[in-house]
Image (spheres, helix red, strand yellow):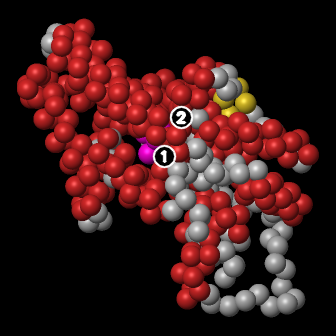
Amino acid sequence: MHGAGIFQTDAQQANTDPFIAFHLDKALVRKYMSPLLIGELAPDQPSFEPSKNKKLVEDFRELRATVEKMGLLQPNHAFFFLYLCHILVLDVAAWLIIWYFGASLVPFLFSAVLLGTVQAQAGWLQHDFGHLSVFSKSRWNHWVHKFVIGHLKGAPASWWNHLHFQHHAKPNCFRKDPDVNMHPLFFALGKTLSVELGVQKKKFMPYNHQHKYFFIIGPPALVPLYFQWYIFYFVVQRKQWVDLAWMMSFYIRFFLTYLPFLGVKGTLGLHLLVRFIESNWFVWVTQMNHIPMHIDYDKNVDWFSTQLQATCNVHQSFFNDWFSGHLNFQIEHHLFPTMPRHNYWKVAPLVKSLCAKHGIEYQCKPLLTAFADIVHSLKDSGELWLDAYLHK
């Protein structure tokens, strides 16, 4: 076994860089790993995998050391406190609109937009705590993570952890990254996988039209029609009762808050509309960095190359930072998952320099271009599938 242990998604692969990237207290984790050691490499055995760029690995580790020395992994607690406050203010404002103006259509819609914003922004904030980016102790991050994702959003922390870290370990790697599991049941993703699907004469959907039906089963539907029921199945099936209690606290608070003004049907309608707004916001932002990028089977390349081939950035601006929860710096986030997001812009020039040194493309584009590229990439892969399906 490699000294850094084995991840489920990285079985029989060296994991030093993922290990360093994901853990805060590495000494503590190594104590738990000791009983898992099954042997050491013989002196005559190569300690570096031939599929990885040794010089790039060394340069990235130097960059990691520089990042630590610059203090870029240290959080600004005031930033996250104010971020939480702005979410709570929006949440209260949504209720005040209904309370003061009544339940007519215009106040109802204004309240829904504010609550949808609350859900989207709380989604970015829970992401910070889930990645252990806010506190120096993992336990403190986990506690607040449960509050934000459970009480403010009504979702289970265990479900997010289970899926999201697999995504980070192997982004855009089919059968390892759960974020591309919609291939091939709903979409044909990536050039290689789409051609493979066509050659195999498989057709679960009319993929040559996927850039059209994406607008129906993608952004509007993911949260209200899938996540909403699956998260309850997940926590019950895995007996995550603490997460279930946090989730129920959200629904109890929501219905106690709005039921007196809107009644049962109105409250259910408000909740559905909020989830619809959240879903559109969430899908467009989270997919703009990955779907247009390289999607294939895992080739066991080095950590830096794995992240760069699967991620791209969006131009920085105050709005883009806020709207995307700083996921417009997706490259930096994937390279340094525990880095507080307010420091991404500081490390970006160093990452660009390393990319230039090794001839690796560092993609950064305008926000609307990033959105459009999702649709264009789906159209391209759908056409590749159709050509292979008909002619190969």
Q: Taken as a whole, is the magenta stretch helix, strand or loop?
A: helix
| Residue drawn at the location 86% of the way across and 42% of the way down | 353
Residue 304 visible, this orientation: no
Front in this rendered view, residue 55 or 64? 64
Q: Position of residue 190 (x, y in %)?
A: 63, 41
C-alpha distance separating marks 1 and 2? 9 Å
| Residue drawn at the location 8% of the way across and 26% of the way down | 260
Q: Are marks 1 and 2 in contact (CB under 8 Å)?
A: yes
Mark 1 crowd level (few <14, some 14–19, many ≥20, 10 Å Cα): many
Q: Amino acid at mark 2?
A: Gly
**Is 234 in the magenta?**
no
Question: Which residue in the rendered view is the most extreme toward the front?
Answer: 78
Q: Is residue 391 left or right of residue 96?
A: right
Q: Amino acid at mark 1?
A: His
| Residue drawn at the location 73% of the way across and 30% of the way down | 364
Q: Secondary structure at mark 2?
A: loop
Q: Is residue 146 left or right of residue 388?
A: left
Mark 2 crowd level (few <14, some 14–19, many ≥20, 10 Å Cα): many
Task: Locate residue 226: give its quadrant.
Answer: top left
Residue segment shown in magenta:
123-128
Give the number of the disc on residue 339.
Answer: none
Give the number of the disc on residue 127.
Answer: 1
Q: Is residue 186 left or right of residue 13?
A: left
Q: Position of residue 388 (x, y in %)?
A: 64, 39
| Residue drawn at the location 53% of the way across and 81% of the way down | 32
Give the number of the disc on residue 325.
Answer: 2
Front in this rendered view, residue 259 or 282? 259
Task: Locate residue 87: give its quadrant.
Answer: top left
Front in this rendered view, residue 78 or 365? 78
Residue 97 visible, this orientation: yes
Q: Secondary structure at mark 1?
A: helix
Tell which circle, 1 or 2, labels the residue nearer the N-terminal end.
1
